[in-house]
Image (tube, rainbow, N blue to C red):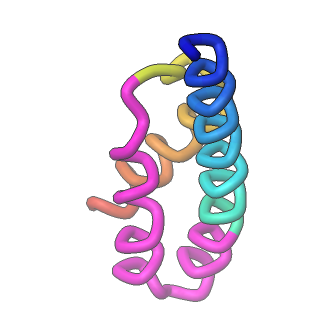
Amino acid sequence: MPRRRAQLDDSIFSAKFWELRAALDLARLWHDQGKRTEARDLLSPIYDWFTEGFDTQDLKEAKALLVDLAQ
C-alpha cells in the first residue's frame, strides 16, 4: 500500500508541474498584454501549492514572474 501511495503522490506532483507550466505560459502572455492582476491570480495559487522543488527551472521562473507582477 505505501508503494501505491508513493506512486499516486508522484503522479499528483507531476500533474501539478504540468499545470504550473501551462499557467506560467498563460501568465506570461497576460503579463505582456498588461493583464497583470489576472496573471498573478492564475499563477499564485499554483505556485503556492508546491512545498519542494524550488530549485527547478519552472518554479524559479514562476517565482521571478510573481515578483515582477507584485511590483
Q: Is residue 69 left or right of residue 55?
A: left
Q: Is residue 37 above or below residue 6?
A: below
Instruction: State the image coordinates of residue 6 (x, y, percent, origin top left).
Output: 60, 19
Instruction: State the image coordinates of residue 63 (x, y, percent, origin top left).
Output: 45, 41
Q: Is residue 43 above or below residue 17?
A: below
Q: From which residue to which does the magenta span run?
A: 26-51
Q: Is residue 41 left or right of residue 54?
A: left
Q: Which image quadrant is residue 51 in? A: top left
Give the residue drawn at x 60%, y 47%: 16
For residue 38: magenta?
A: yes
In the image, farthest residue toward the left: 71
Quadrant of the drawing holding the C terminus? bottom left
* Number of numbered callouts drawn: 0
In the image, farthest residue toward the front: 1
Give the residue drawn at x 40%, y 53%: 66
Instruction: State the image coordinates of residue 11 (x, y, percent, origin top left).
Output: 69, 36
Quadrant of the drawing holding the N terminus? top right
Magenta region, main secondary structure:
helix
For residue 32: magenta?
A: yes
Give the residue drawn at x 55%, y 35%: 59
In the image, farthest residue toward the top: 2
Q: Is residue 23 above or below residue 54?
A: below
Instruction: State the image coordinates of residue 67 (x, y, percent, origin top left).
Output: 36, 49
